[in-house]
Image (cartoon, rainbow, N blue to C red):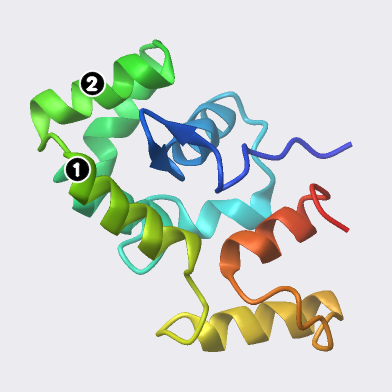
Amino acid sequence: MSTYPKSPKEMTGGMMYFPRMLDKIRLHGRGELPEDYHANLGKQRAADGACTNFLRINYGVLRERVLKGGTDEEILEWCYLNGRRLNAGDLTVWNGFVSKLGWNDFATPLLEEQKEKCGITGRTDIVTIPELIDFDEKRRS
């Protein structure tokens, strides 16, 4: 049985995707993250990089902090103290961006490529990367 990280739709402190990124770091640190996920860990052209950039935190430094322990809420507060604190408007912008990733934007070709790889090119109900991730990780049929 595979161990999947949390859904990209989960939130910590009103911020989508953040719990998934931390979960991937923890799983990787324990050697439990599937190999398919390793290539995009912390990459600037992937969601991890976009998230750490938005928070103004270095991924490697965040990874070290996460592996020391703490709740998602404690680590988000650490990010606010060491990067930048997000306000309600920032959270609206971030959540809008990450929830629609792949829908008529720069990531659409990746979404279409991954749908083809999964054999679901005809699935018109899967129009974003978060929806595809939840399908691929068996959280949606």
Q: Is residue 31 above or below residue 43?
A: above
What residue do we see at 27% from left, 58% from top?
Answer: 93
For the N terminus, give its image quadrant: top right
Which residue matches tag 2?
A: 77
What residue do we see at 55% from left, 48% from top?
Answer: 8
User: Residue 37: which numbered mark, if any?
Assistant: none
Please provide percent x and percent y for residue 97: 37, 64
Q: Residues within 10 Å of mark 1 (few under 14, many from 20)?
A: some
Please provide percent x and percent y for residue 128: 59, 71
Give, as a three-letter code, the residue at label 1: Asn
Q: The residue tagged with tag 2: helix, strand or loop?
A: helix
What residue do we see at 47% from left, 80% from top?
Answer: 107
Please provide percent x and percent y for residue 88: 22, 41
Residue 72 in the figure: left or right of residue 130 = left
Residue 38 in the figure: left or right of residue 69 = right
Q: Is residue 39 above or below residue 30?
A: below
Give, as a three-letter code, the residue at label 2: Glu
Residue 135 in the figure: left or right of residue 5 = right
For the C terminus, give its image quadrant: bottom right
Instruction: Estimate the spatial distance between the alpha carbons at disc 2 and disc 1, rounded to whole Å.
Output: 15 Å
What residue do we see at 62% from left, 43% from top?
Answer: 7
Residue 26 in the figure: left or right of residue 124 = left
Between disc 2 and disc 1, the foreground one is 2
Which residue matches tag 1?
A: 58
State which tag comes first along the sequence, 2 or 1: 1
The tally of labels here is: 2
Please provide percent x and percent y for residue 98: 42, 60
Q: The residue tagged with tag 1: helix, strand or loop?
A: loop
